[in-house]
Amino acid sequence: MIPHNRPCVTAEDRAAVDSVLASGWIAQGPAVAALEALFVARHGGGGACAVSSGTAALFLAIRALGEKQGTVVAMPSYSCSALLNAVFMAGATPRVVDVRTDSFCIDPDALAENAADAQIVVAVHTFGAPADVTALQAGGRAVIEDCCQALGGSVDGIPLGTRGAASIFSFYASKIVTGGQGGLVWSSSAATVANVRDYREFDGRDHYVPRFNLQMTDIQAALVGSQMARIEAIRARRAQIAGAYLSALPTGLGSQSGIGSPGRMTHRFVVVAPDSRTRDRLRTHMQSAGIACIAPIERFELLHRYLGLNPEAFPAAEQLADVALSLPLHLQLTDDDVTHISNTLSDFLP
Ligand SMILES: *Cc1c(COP(=O)(O)O)cnc(C)c1O
């Protein structure tokens, strides 16, 4: 069976980890600082703070931007529960907003209509597709760019994550580069980064307040940093695989918009079927050829469903949960795998 996702760890990555293990310093230290410097350089300045997960990064970014309890934070419904968790843990109030059926990203019109009271918006660049940050900033809202699925992507040559008030990244095992776990906050605002960093340095403080330990280890940072050195090659290979699938897509099936656009980081290649029966038939068709495919977000996982809100108010998210199917797209796929997946896809009769 070709797995839907698998991390790619090279001999150089293992050597980078080994040198940390041999150094005698394996907790947060010089490798974490080096990873932060790398993100500052990529984003042309600002500051970065590496932490234990993408959820921790989002929690800290919300805390830094919305100091008051009760800050209202908007987020897309078609997304992962980590968003809700971070908002609640920060003492903020979530506003779930429907998405666009083409990009799968939060719909700025639905935001204006149904979440006008939000001071902060979490703009998830879903599966690599850029959310419309400029439209979301209307009215002076603070945008947190969630780049957990879009690291290495850019629009008009500008890296995703540089236009909002802050951006967050995840290095979980299924993401574009991984340390097993890990996360990072970047911001152009020194005050925002200082706020995040202040929380992270939980020990030995003269003024005591309760803080979780959300630190990253140098072991993780070395693994992530080593993979970051080949981020452009990772982007190119993912684009090549996505291009092969797009060409093989039979008439009657669609895909998330923007695949193949310049600078796009394709985290996932998601097929859009005309209805749920066709989606389920496609999954069986691929599976019987030894190809594992998944519904990226199941109906019960939609954030409005977790909150017990009326599903009729979120028609796009509901539809995507029914008709989307994600094909394997990762660095462990061989050219033969990609050909087999493409041929199997093109053989499908919608
Ligand atoms: C993975 C992910 C997160 C959470 O990151 P973790 O490192 O798993 O805590 C948040 N947002 C999005 C869009 C993600 O894909």
Image (spheres, rainbow, N blue to C red):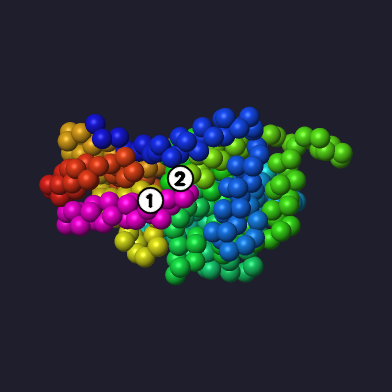
- SS for dot 2: helix
Q: Which residues are magenta?
A: 228-252
> Which residue is nearer to you in this view: 323 or 129?
129
Marking on residue 227: 2
> Which residue is nearer to you in this view: 152 or 1?
152
Q: Is residue 229 shown to the viewer in this render?
A: yes
Residue 82, given in percent of the width and then of the height, sits at: 54, 41
Q: Residue at x 73, y 43 (%)?
A: 199
- Are there few (<14), some (14-19), or many (20+) residues within 10 Å of tag 1? many
In the rendered image, which residue does mark 1 sit on? 234
- Are there few (<14), some (14-19), or many (20+) residues within 10 Å of tag 2? many
The quarter in which the N terminus is drawn is top left
* Amino acid type, residue under disc 1 in the picture: Ile
Residue 306, given in percent of the width and then of the height, sits at: 51, 39
Q: Residue at x 45, y 62 (%)?
A: 154
Q: Earlier in the sequence, mark 2 or mark 1?
A: 2
Residue 181, given in percent of the width and then of the height, sits at: 52, 36
Residue closest to the far right: 206
Residues marked 2 and 1 touching at CB (< 8 Å): yes
Q: Is residue 113 shown to the viewer in this render?
A: no
Residue 118, given in percent of the width and then of the height, sits at: 62, 58
- What predominant SS class does the magenta segment belong to? helix
* Amino acid type, residue under disc 2 in the picture: Gln
Q: CA distance from mark 2 to mark 1?
A: 9 Å
* Left or right: 124 in relation to 64: left
- SS for dot 1: helix
Q: Is residue 235 magenta?
A: yes
